Image (cartoon, grey):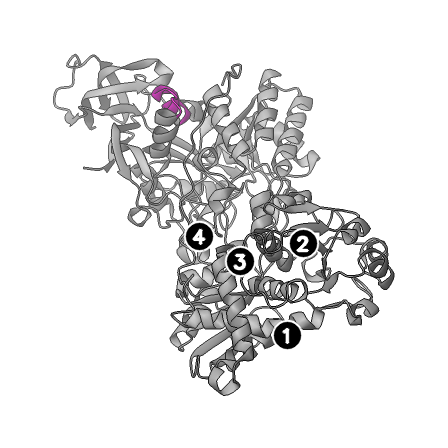
Amino acid sequence: MNATAAPARRQLQPPPVAPSPFPYNPGSLLSVQDLSLDTVSHLLTRASALEAMDPIERARILAKRRVALLFYESSTRTRTSFELAAKALGADTTLVSSLSSSIEKGETLKDTGLTLHSLGAEAIILRHKASGAPWVLEQFTRLPVLNAGDGMHEHPTQSLLDLRTILQHLLPGLTTVSADTLSGVTVSIVGDIFHSRVARSNMFLLPRLGAKVVLCGPRELLPEIATTAGPGITIERDFEAALRQSQVVMMLRIQAERLAGLQLDLETYKASYQLTGQRLATLAPSAVVMHPGPIIRGLELTAGVADGPQSAILEQVRNGVAIRMAVVERALTAHGARA
Amino acid sequence: MTSLVIRGGHLIDPAAGIDAPKDTLLKDGRVADIAAPGKLKSANGAEALDATGLTVAPGLIDIHVHLREPGQGYKETIATGTAAAAAGGFTSVAAMPNTTPVNDSPEITRWMLAPERNASIRVFPIAAATRGSKGEAINDFAALKSAGAVAVTDDGHPILKDNIMRETLAAAARVGLSVIQHAEDTRMTQGCSMNAGPTAFKLGLRGMPPEAESSLVERDIRLVTELRDARVHLHVAHTSTAAAIAAVRQARRNGLRVTCEVAPHHFLLTEEHVDLYSTNAKMNPPLRSAADRDAMIEAILDGIVDAIATDHAPHAVHEKEVEFEHAPNGITGLETALGLCLRWLHREWKLPLGRVLSLLSAQPATLLGLKGRGTLAVGSFADVVLFDPKAEWTYRAAETRSKSHNTPFDGWTMQGKVRYTISEGRIVYTSA
């Protein structure tokens, strides 16, 4: 039990971390971090091609294939666009939501997944409250799993549709990306970063294309540690300073459902971080304004900005269908499954 | 009664200062004699065990295990948990009180010790410090001690109220019991499922700050200081942060009776081993940063750490096959402790074998006042482990004797294969 003086630090060689087995299925889209830039380009290219395709011909691509949508959280945009995307490719879809299924009776995610698998589902689109849930589902079903948002973690199709929206505005017609496609572009992500899966997916993806990502928000919603998520990410607490340097501004909703007791003074928040017509006109008159939705008018942005000429919010929604067609096609077709 | 003679082995008994070839005679559950090879008197008629090439050492002692009985027999029973312990070379384990119901009474303590539990090795119950481990009403420590409890703790429900903790430390000291604290200020860890840091941020998980551990260790040390009673003994369970170790180091310099243990996973793994939501890397305290992990290794090598303890926490397979945030905390550890300690502490980081064994036997015995354990001095209990120190082998969780196999060490290379485990003179584990 005797303490002795600490000797000089030793060089310690600890055990390594074993390589991850994920994704088990090459058709899965669990995280944007799993996508090579070639795959991103492939998805962008297919999104444009599928969007332009004759609907009858398009519906042959996945005719009568079975896609399950498994939703543990409410959703308007993501659910509807995934469903429309799968149907546009000819697939049969079925929706299982936590409030109208045996999930209410205590069925686990594993058992729900295995049940859907037995019912013939060939791919599962999962929205879940818990970060990491798509990994659980993929591990036990080995099906292609498409992450439609997991807790505070990721929302990969959102960041792909955001990328498509950004490219349409800044580099129209481009669907092939590389490590410098967005060099010189600053994207500010503003608001509730900590609880946002959209923010995480975008900060994981956009810097890989050369973009500078500036995170902006109060400390309670944006911890300093966020800059360690990857290279090319910085924090700017001053919203106006962030706006001044941005070509793209992504506004985020304060996620009341994930605040976990955190008290925020909304009036103070609005004074510092609300995107108003005046701020936009004076500081970023040509920036693209984006928002993953749902928007709360009068909180993170004013109604005038949401409906104004710089807003790309509804284009993002439209791009959601195109991107999700490409992602569902990749999940279920051999040529699409090349990772 | 029976007698057993161990011949041809190399005896390492750190407490007795022995590190030499010796023959050992065990008789009636005690060590009867130790002598140079071939020099044992009165070994005639004793059953002989050939220990050629093996290290003979005091049976290992794990002061932090969860045996899950009473009440959670689907995870583990006292019989299966102690069978796993025997396979790992352990001859004594101290069982935590977070059972169902909580072990906060002499009746439950005695129930755990009853022969009907079919324990392979010696079990030492650690009783709850407060009624139902609710942190409000302090239990009758004298009664618990006479029923067989060797320490008190509220383990996973740390005592947050200063006055209750102060009273617990004082009351335990009066009857000669140690107070073990799972140091976690749970007001800082609500909804958290791993260590706070870059990995948690990237995985979208809420993180437990290291300060949740160190601030409570500092608070407890302050209470020990204020009590000014040399009998007060605070033991910090599963220390995982550099700051908590620093606090223990300082307390020791100040002459306080403050001890600590470290679990193998905290000196081997980091938060990066959570990887993509591996629930077998989820425990409490969580896997920490590389700097914290390095601080655990340094503290072990420097002699600040008093014991290696596994925090063996079995959970059924279905409980771990869930979303990371919903999975229960804990991993099994009894069968992997020796193999990991020899592979890493001894071979990789050059801690002498005697010191490794001391951390796994002599020191934990002293810490909890387990008389006649942790040494093979003549007259001690015949608790012995015989292992092949050179043998390398691969741990297979599927082959465990525990009811559960929630371990991050499945498939890992271990060093040192246990050949025999002897509990009070009986051979309770043998492997080819």
Name above or below for residue A48 compared with residue B202. Answer: below
In this rendering, position of residue A139 left or right of residue A210: left
| Chain of the residue displaying label 4 | B
Tell me the CA gap for discs 3 and 4: 41 Å
Residue A110 magenta-drawn?
no
Name above or below for residue B378 compared with residue A45. Answer: above
Labels 2 & 3 near each other (Cβ < 8 A): no
**Discs 3/4, front:** 3
Q: Which residue matches tag 3?
A: A32
| Chain of the residue displaying label 2 | A
In this rendering, position of residue B254 left or right of residue B376: right
Percent position of residue A89, x then y? 49, 80
Does dot 2 land on a helix, a strand or a loop?
loop
Looking at the picture, do discs 1 and 4 lie on one chain?
A: no
Q: Which residue matches tag 1?
A: A318
Residue type at tag 3: Val
Tell me the CA gap for discs 1 and 2: 23 Å
Does dot 3 land on a helix, a strand or a loop?
helix
Labels 1 & 2 near each other (Cβ < 8 A): no
**Discs 1/2, front:** 2
Residue A196, numbered label: none
Residue type at tag 4: Gln
The residue depicted at 87 percent of the width and 61 percent of the height is A278
Residue type at tag 2: Val
Does dot 4 land on a helix, a strand or a loop?
loop
Question: Which of marks 3 and 2 precedes in the sequence?
Answer: 3
> Can I make out residue B144 in this image?
yes
Q: Which residue matches tag 4?
A: B72
